[in-house]
Amino acid sequence: MSDFHRISAAARSLGDLFADLTDLFGKELRLAQSELKHGFANITQAAVLFVATGMLALFAVLLLLVGIVHLIASFGLALHWSYILVAVALLVVAAIIFFAARAKASADNLIPKRTLVQLGETTRTLKEQIR
């Protein structure tokens, strides 16, 4: 094979390598974008749950205050104890929702883990092919 054909084949191979690398990095960027979108979706859900928790806690505090008012105003037990019982139940529900939201709002949801692993594998593969 002549020098021209070897140089031409090497140039084509190098061109193919760069085209493949460009394609690979493009796909990895799309994967990272997808993972970030998923992370932001979790953060959005957490924010909605935090708002719901705040609303429930507000209603619970209002009911608790009304129950305390009824407790002081009337020394009977029926009406105010029912208000207090409902307020405590709402606070329990708010606590459950809060802990569910806090679990979704972790910073780990924003790290594109699969992309980082894939980039490491790509780097190792490139080092092997260059040798």
Image (cartoon, rainbow, N blue to C red):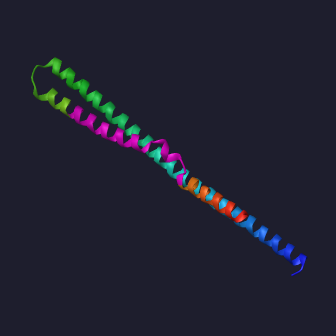
Report the number of discs: 0
> Percent position (x, y) of residue 93?
28, 39
Q: Is residue 84 depicted above or below 22 in this figure?
A: above
Is 61 on the left-hand or right-hand side of 120? Answer: left
Residue farthest to the front, as pictured: 131
On the rendered image, what quadrant is the C terminus found in?
bottom right
Q: Is residue 19 depicted above or below 83 in this figure?
A: below
Task: Examine the image and state in which quarter residue 129 appears.
Answer: bottom right
Q: Kindly identify the residue that appears in the image at 63 percent across and 56 percent down.
A: 29
Instruction: Give whichever of 30, 58 is nearer the camera.
Output: 30
- Membership of 53 in magenta stretch: no
Residue farthest to the bottom, as pictured: 1
Q: Main secondary structure of the magenta part?
A: helix
- Membership of 100 in magenta stretch: yes
> Percent position (x, y) of residue 60?
28, 31
Q: Is residue 5 depicted above or below 94 in this figure?
A: below
Task: Examine the image and state in which quarter residue 84 appears.
Answer: top left
> Percent position (x, y) of residue 1?
86, 82
Which residues, given as a range, are shown in magenta?
86-113
Instruction: Give whichever of 94, 24 is nearer the camera.
Output: 24
Instruction: Give whichever of 89, 8 is nearer the camera.
Output: 8
Q: Kindly identify the residue that appears in the image at 34 percent across and 41 percent down.
A: 97
Task: Examine the image and state in which quarter residue 77 appears.
Answer: top left
Q: Kindly identify the residue that appears in the image at 58 percent across and 53 percent down.
A: 116
Q: Kindly identify the residue that appears in the image at 61 percent across and 56 percent down.
A: 119
Is 54 on the left-hand or right-hand side of 128? Answer: left
Is 62 on the left-hand or right-hand side of 101? Answer: left
